[in-house]
Amino acid sequence: MTGEVLRRFDELTPEELEDKLARAAAAAASYRLTSVEERAGWLQHAADRLEKEVESVSGMITTEMGKTFRAAEEEVAKCVHGLRFYAAEGPAFLRDLDRDGGRVGAKQTFVTYQPIGVVLAVMPWNLPLWQAMRFAAPALMAGNVGLLKHASNVPQCALYLEELFRDAGFPDDVFQTLLISAGRVEQVLRDPRVAAATLTGSEPAGRSVATIAGNEIKKVVLELGGSDPFIIMPSTNLERATDVAVKARCLNNGQSCINGKRFYVHRDIGDAFIEMFVAKMSALVVGDPMDEGTDVGPLATESGRRDVESYVDDAVGKGATVLLGGERPDGPGWFYPPTVLTGITPEMRMYHEEVFGPVAQVWTVPSLEEALREANGHPYGLGSNLWSEDEAERELFVRDVQSGMAFINGNTTSYPEIPFGGVKRSGYGRELSDLGMREFMNAKTVWIGQDA
């Protein structure tokens, strides 16, 4: 959180990486034969241990990437819930699905879901446990083996996950962490022992992984950038909408793909929204993330803060108006204040790109149709948010917004119970729920003929 180096970790040597790949392949051959009851039990053991270690694990998360300790505790709790969800519901997701054999000239036909083997996960630092867990829990429940290439600035979280699953009773080498640089991901993905990959990260990283996977004809799920629209209509409760708008923009210190980033407010309530929104953003406490009273901690990296500053400076230099923030504070740590801008135009970089920090862009619009036109003009399509009590407006929003997720009168978030993912340049495929588990399974059709 201060930029101080506390510990260094060695990257795997070529020989060590080869050993891990060989052990993963060997584990996959036997792990696929374990029962769903055994896997569910191991997930439950992992949940129990993680729940007991919430304080130490939360401190580790905060130290490595700077989110508030309170937010880290919430992340750990979400991981516990995710593990227990797949332990409870996973067996039902894995049941064979019967089909009408008579319609295809068979005595019986059904679909059986089988694991595909070793899956590589390339994960980011912003939710260092939850991002990895929403891959790991369904993959392990499905009978797959996981290889985690985590972000280089959260190695302790990465190593902890390997330890967690091993100590929960999973067989050796079923889940391994790879401490390797981004430049070695291609080698791992091209390895014939690796069946598929999932990546959460930037658009360039997604493009690279998708290209490699396509060349190797391997399945890949991509959850990439987001610049989610947050639309506020006159029929809503403005007090509640502004409360959630502040949370939506500054949650995780503003570093989440599903943060609300572009705020479109109907002009009839535009002045009132902006006044309330700016007042509530300005009341946030920026400081030590270990302090219980802190709302916004530092950004995770020095380069990340430079990126945020460059977006704001570019916009201001081209005519945007700063209503709040916009300048880095003095002192140690990679802090950046909650910031509100208006007057954003297509000439500015942030109009088309994702700002990964607590910077809100606000527009006033004459109608929901105009808000949707502006929202859909962006290349990303991850989440979206509408605040309205009008049923017709809700139906229009659900029908026309170009996003993988549409939330109404509540903050966009992820739940293990429902699918998560985007469209357009936000990626493809789904995480979580039964859909996320089945992304990395062979849906095998079985046809059994009539008796002779």
Image (cartoon, grey):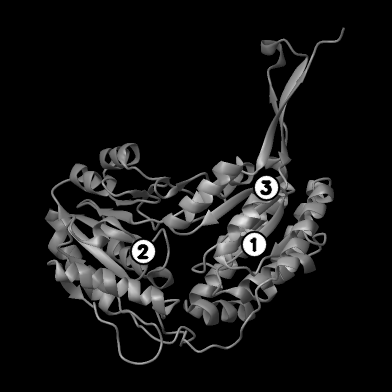
2 and 1 marks in contact (CB < 8 Å) = no
Above or below, comparing residue 62 to residue 332 in the picture: above
First in sequence: mark 1 vs mark 3: 3
Q: Residue at x 41, y 83 (%)?
A: 294
Viewer-nearest of discs 2 and 1? 1
Q: Position of residue 89 (x, y in %)?
A: 67, 47
Whether residue 256 is visible to the viewer of this picture, yes or no, is yes
Q: Residue at x 49, y 53 (%)?
A: 208
First in sequence: mark 2 vs mark 3: 3
Q: Position of residue 388 (x, y in %)?
A: 27, 49
User: How much space separates mark 2 and mark 1, taking CA atoms?
Assistant: 28 Å
**Nearer to me, 391 or 89:** 89
Above or below, comparing residue 451 to residue 377 in the picture: above
The residue wearing badge 1 is: 148
Residue 341 falls left or right of residue 439: left
Q: Quadrant of residue 83?
A: bottom right
Q: Which mark is residue 412?
A: none
Q: Amino acid at mark 1?
A: Leu
Residue 63 falls left or right of residue 295: right
User: How much space separates mark 1 and mark 3, taking CA atoms?
Assistant: 24 Å
First in sequence: mark 2 vs mark 1: 1
User: How much space separates mark 2 and mark 3, taking CA atoms?
Assistant: 29 Å
Q: Quadrant of residue 243?
A: bottom left
Residue 134 falls left or right of residue 347: right
Q: Which mark is residue 89?
A: 3
Whether residue 419 is visible to the viewer of this picture, yes or no, is no
Q: Look at the numbered disc 3 and give the secondary structure of its residue.
A: helix
Q: Look at the numbered disc 2 and give the secondary structure of its residue.
A: helix
